[in-house]
Amino acid sequence: MFEKLSLLWKNEAPLTQEYKEFDEMLQLDLQMFRRITEAMLKGEDLRPLENEIYETDVKVNKLERKIRKALVTHLAVTEGADVASSLVLMSIVKDAERMGDYCKNLYGLSECTSGPITGFQFFATIQDLIRHVTEVFENTIKAFDTEDSVLAAEIVADEVRWNKRFDKTIRDLARATLPTDEAVTSALLVRMMKRLQAHLSNITSTIIQPVHRIDHRPKHLRDNAAKTPSGEDGEDIS
């Protein structure tokens, strides 16, 4: 699918500018994510980041609207326009916009607790999850920019395994005795990490999946996930 899709974005192709703007959306999302999580993991006060985060999110939203408008115009006035590829771009632009929202909400978690997350009982696990999503973020941008189908397939396959870890962490949090603010903040943070990973996987799925399978995982991955109990994938995920 991506080979056909990328033809719209090469050199003087009709949607070259929109591709560049979509890439800019991903870069802005990653910028927000890094700024917030790096401060969190260092136990720093996030309040000085407020204006930067909200202004960056506005930029992401404006880019989404600009790309969507350009796609509608392209489909309306271009004879023989590739409808399927345009709709795929419309879909992943929404993923990028949602990631901006999750980053903004991630910043909002700083108001849910009176102290830094570095003192949380599950801090080590949360730290690993954040590092994982950071790597997925970086690899997604790399895979999309270089049309790397091997890397894209790894990201999609890895999502299934890491989903087990996210879900196990939520169950562990539910069973732990924690202060209310710590329990709520930890659970929401883990869920946001899982959702960010899902949107990134959706984007990379465009490289390896046919149009009707985008946002869905290959059947063999779902079958393997169903057969493998959480925590039994050969790794220590505690």
Image (tube, rainbow, N blue to C red):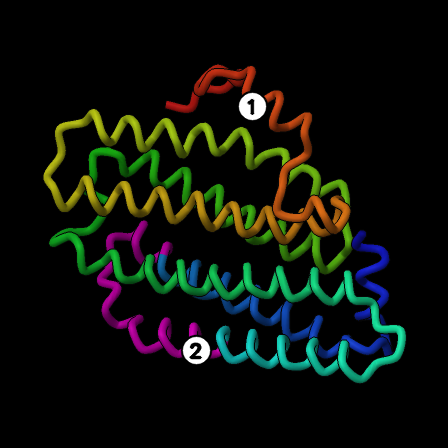
Q: What stretch is highlighted in magenta?
A: 37-59
Residue 40 located within the stretch drawn in magenta: yes
At a point 41% along the width and 38% down the height, the residue shown is 128
Q: Where is residue 155 in the image (x, y as percent from the top left)?
A: 63, 41
Residue 91, labelled with which disc? Answer: none
Front in this rendered view, residue 98 or 141: 98
Residue 225, labelled with which disc? Answer: 1
Between disc 2 and disc 1, the foreground one is 1
* Residue type highlighted by circle 1: Ala
Residue under numbered circle 2: 58
At label 1, counting other C-alpha atoms closer than 10 Å, the crowd grade (few under 14, some 14-19, many 20 or more) is some
Q: Is the magenta stretch mostly helix, strand or loop?
A: helix
Q: Is mark 1 on a helix, strand or loop?
A: helix
Answer above or below: position of 192 versus 126: below
Q: Are marks 2 and 1 in contact (CB under 8 Å)?
A: no
Front in this rendered view, residue 159 or 31: 159
Q: Earlier in the sequence, mark 2 or mark 1?
A: 2
Q: What element carries label 2?
A: helix
* Residue type highlighted by circle 2: Val
